[in-house]
Amino acid sequence: MKKYLLLAIFSMILTGCGMSKYHIKSDQQFNNLSSLLKKLDKSKNNTPELREQIETLYLSLSKQLLTDIDIYSTLTGTDKWDKIISSYQTLNRLSDVIHKSKAREFIAAESYQSALQVAKQNAAADYYQLALDKMQYGDKASFREAYYLFTKVNQYYPGFRDVKKQMDYAWKQSILNVVINPVTDQSSFYAQMTPNRFGNSFNSDLLQRSLVRDLGGDFNKNAPARFYMDREAHLARIDVDWLVDIMWTRLDVPYPLTRTSTIERSKQIEISKDSLSKPVYQTVTAKLKITQRYFTAYGELECRITDAKTRDNIFLRRYNSQTEWSQSYATYTGDRRALTDEDWTMINNNTPLPDRQDILLVLYQKIYPQLKNGIYNEVKDF
């Protein structure tokens, strides 16, 4: 049985390889040609009908691709090269599968490798000039666009002219200088906080400083932006492009609610043995009074990015967070021997309520990754 299973798997692999061997493009007509070529390989005699079908379909597909190239060549946009190059690549793939099959015996499939290389070189030249034109605008958005155009040039024709030098220049000119301002609090939550382990600057420093550090600061040379705290940018006389303003719009830490309940416990315990050494049991009982204190805290943080020169809005998003806290305490009356280990955990529980700073830190830690990624993605996609 195992032998037959292995043979079946091997047969499936061969079948899959046969299909991929002649795969040209995910299109019905190309798939039809692939199926005919596979059928031709399996046939012992090359029937005239099958040969004619293959030759007719091959010529039809080749002619259509060449016609498409002629039409694309009349277009004016540089994106025409993507279509032209794709068509030449399909023509070459079409030629390859013919040479791999028995169809090579009756079809002289033409290679378009030279035409493809010429198209790639022409595409590189057009995209290169378009990138140079973009840089003439002088703004960072245009330099960023020019960088991606130069990247495309290098993909089509690696090492074209001085493309790598131009890529490096365009990238450096496109880097944004981003200032993250101190965090503000619209909810007045911070005003109610007492001095804590973060000093007295939790709102101004912790979130602001962490973002600048984790986003790469001014030392990550591969990042699309340099990040600064406001006072750092001022002292270094940085020409600021974007301002990031972060504000807690909601910080709600309600007073804990209380829920009480009573549970009866009973247990049989061995108190002695009788004359036959059999255990004698007694039922003991206790009453457990449980007090549960709980609350749900909510936080909402708004992040707004504006252009430092025009004050135009670039990005605005709000991030939400919540955390639930619950703690159970207990007292009892009756026989302590009736209580469970879980009961004693509640009885001995002396954990205090978390303070406001602890709750704020939890809310902050849940929101922080979303906030950081939101800022970085906006800068990266600029």
Image (tube, rainbow, N blue to C red):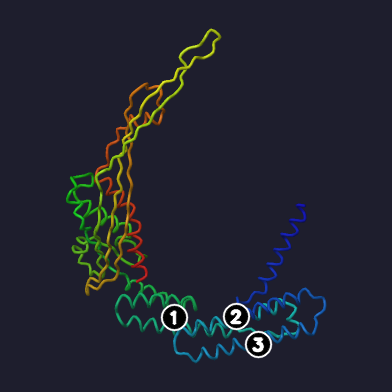
Tag 2 secondary structure = helix
- Counting other residues with Cα less than 10 Å from the Cα at mark 3, is it few (<14), some (14-19), or many (20 or more)? few
| Mark 2–mark 3 distance (CA, rounded to whole Å) | 13 Å
Residue beneath the point at 64% across and 79% down: 30
Q: Which residue is mark 1?
A: 161
Q: Nearer the viewer, residue 286 or 200?
A: 286
Tag 1 secondary structure = loop
Q: Which residue is mark 3?
A: 60
Q: Position of residue 283 (x, y in %)?
A: 44, 20
Q: Earlier in the sequence, mark 2 or mark 1?
A: 2
Q: Which residue is mark 2?
A: 90
Q: Position of residue 337 (x, y in %)?
A: 40, 22
**Residues at marks 2 and 3 touching, judged by CB atoms closer than 8 Å:** no
Query: Which image quarter: residue 184?
Result: bottom left
Q: Earlier in the sequence, mark 3 or mark 1?
A: 3
Tag 3 secondary structure = helix
| Mark 3–mark 1 distance (CA, rounded to whole Å) | 39 Å
Q: Is residue 162 left or right of residue 324?
A: right
Q: Position of residue 315 (x, y in %)?
A: 30, 68
| Mark 2–mark 1 distance (CA, rounded to whole Å) | 28 Å
Q: Earlier in the sequence, mark 2 or mark 3?
A: 3
Residue beneath the point at 70% across and 79% down: 99
The amino acid at mark 2 is Thr
**Residues at marks 2 and 1 touching, judged by CB atoms closer than 8 Å:** no
